[in-house]
Image (cartoon, rainbow, N blue to C red):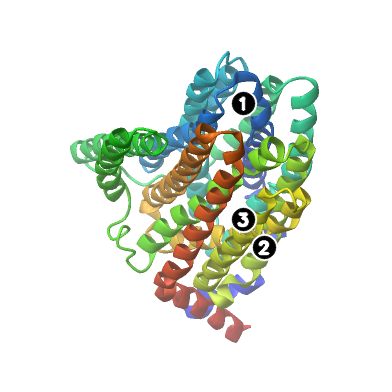
Amino acid sequence: MSASASAPTAQARTAELFAPGLRGLTVGLVATITLAALESLAIGTVMPIVAAELGHLELYGWVYSAYFLGSLVGTVLAGGALDRMPLVRPFAAGLMLFAAGLLVGGLAPSMHVLIAARFIQGLGGGAIAPTAYVAIGRVLPDRLQPRMFAMLSTAWVVPGIIGPSIAAVVGEVAGWRWVFLGLLPLLLLAGGLAISALRSIHDVAPPAAATPERRRSVIRIAAAIGAALGAGILVAALGSSEPALLAVGVVVGALLLVPSYWWLTPRGTLRLAIGVPAAVLLRGVMTFAFFAADAYIPVLLQTWRGTPATLTGVVFTVTTLSWTASSWLQARRIDHYGPRRFVALGFAFIAVGALLTIPAVTAGVPAEITLLTWALPGLGMGFMYSAVTLVVLRGVEGSEQGSASSSLQLSDILGTALGTGVAGAILATGERAGTESLGPALAAVFGVSLVAALGGLLASRRLGAVGATISVRGAQAAAVD
């Protein structure tokens, strides 16, 4: 029995993902993730151009935070729906909201309207990743799941190579609005492919009793709104120059955020209980550590150091390629070493990369050094991102994969929103202090990334038992081979 369950893992081939029964799902998910990657990298590249035209640099971080706070609510809505209905329904609704956000964002007359558009876009984007996770968990056998996650990481390669550079050229020549609007036709193409594949998936868990399930859904939605409000209030308070508003905002934000997060995640998440709860919390820590600094690479290079947008594009390209390369390496070796080692290694790479990037804020250090220093956090994310996802998918029953994937994605989004928001508050403080304070503020942003990564490195030991379990699978497979 152990041989039949474990042996195929070592022999899984990427080509199997394109077998007749799986080809449609693979192509559809890869197309969708490719679009999401292109959107993320393109908009991140032109954001300094947007801020220069619309003004309000102090609101820079909110363009990111609004998207991810919207995604937080959208993820919870999708997570509950995915366990009760065909996957295609919440996914299609999400695509419509995503398109509406792109349209409004491309026509935004002010930074405030752009922030609202990003929130709408995030509501739709929140349905994409949970749907992909659940589809993979329901359709693919365990032995092919690491390969699929690596394939999804590969979906970032082409956008990572051409997306930032094209966005930089479009933003500087035609205007940043066309970066938003130009993504709409691609959304129709990628969304159509994914919807066609998802229609064939009918493995839906039977719904629970109507009244308890309805009550649970209402509570989850209320908790999601509470978490989004709490995170928003917390981020806004951190950026306030008034001590009283800062203190009150932090308290109110925490009172809304912490209970909501507790309700929306597996029991034991906040205390780092070994296994799935620790994996869910660590996903949030890793996205906080990475995106708190990654979102401000364009500000560092274009606004502070005065480099062209093309350098930002190249840095994002290198980071994406390093993320993809380490993701494939992790997929090949995770059943041998287990996820804990890869997660610890990933946090270590983020910490070192953040530390080495801090000198780039000084005029005496070439800005081009970020091509090397920021590739290290990319390697780190590739090592640990999919590893944590596998821990969660393999640690719950099939009927619970929708809720578990939603919790994982929620933690992912919340970490990103808080990371970019906290860093934005630091940037706003530096902006208020004067132009010359922007450099020290950016150094502090990368310092926050460093501290968060070191905390994640220490906490990664809580995956020990789960890591051993998956490692045993790999050892058994090798023995059978």
Tell which of 412 and 47 is nearer to you: 47
Mark 1 nearby-residue class (10 Å; few <14, some 14–19, many ≥20):
some
Q: From the image, state whether disc 2 or disc 3 is nearer to you.
A: 2
Residue at the spot of label 1 = 51
Badge 3 element: helix
186 w.r.t. 377: above or below = above
Badge 1 element: helix
Tell which of 40 and 202 is nearer to you: 40
Upstream in sequence: badge 1 or badge 3: 1
Please say whether residue 132 is visible from this viewpoint: yes
Upstream in sequence: badge 2 or badge 3: 3
Residue at the spot of label 3 = 148
Q: CA distance from mark 2 to mark 3?
A: 14 Å
Given the image, on which type of amino acid does mark 1 rest?
A: Ala
Specify whether 219 is left or right of 202: left
Tell which of 243 and 367 is nearer to you: 243
Please say whether residue 20 is visible from this viewpoint: no
Image quadrant where residue 325 sits = bottom right
At a point 57% along the width and 67% down the height, the residue shown is 348
Given the image, on which type of amino acid does mark 2 rest?
A: Ser
Residue at the spot of label 2 = 326
Location of the C terminus by quadrant is bottom right
Q: CA distance from mark 1 to mark 3?
A: 37 Å
Given the image, on which type of amino acid does mark 3 rest?
A: Met
* Spot occupied by residue 120 in the image (x, y as percentages of width and height): 48, 25
Is the residue under label 2 in contact with that under label 1 (CB below 8 Å)? no
* Spot occupied by residue 41 in the image (x, y as percentages of width and height): 67, 39
Q: From the image, state whether disc 1 or disc 3 is nearer to you.
A: 1
Badge 2 element: helix
Mark 2 nearby-residue class (10 Å; few <14, some 14–19, many ≥20):
many
Upstream in sequence: badge 1 or badge 2: 1
Q: Farthest residue toward the left?
A: 211
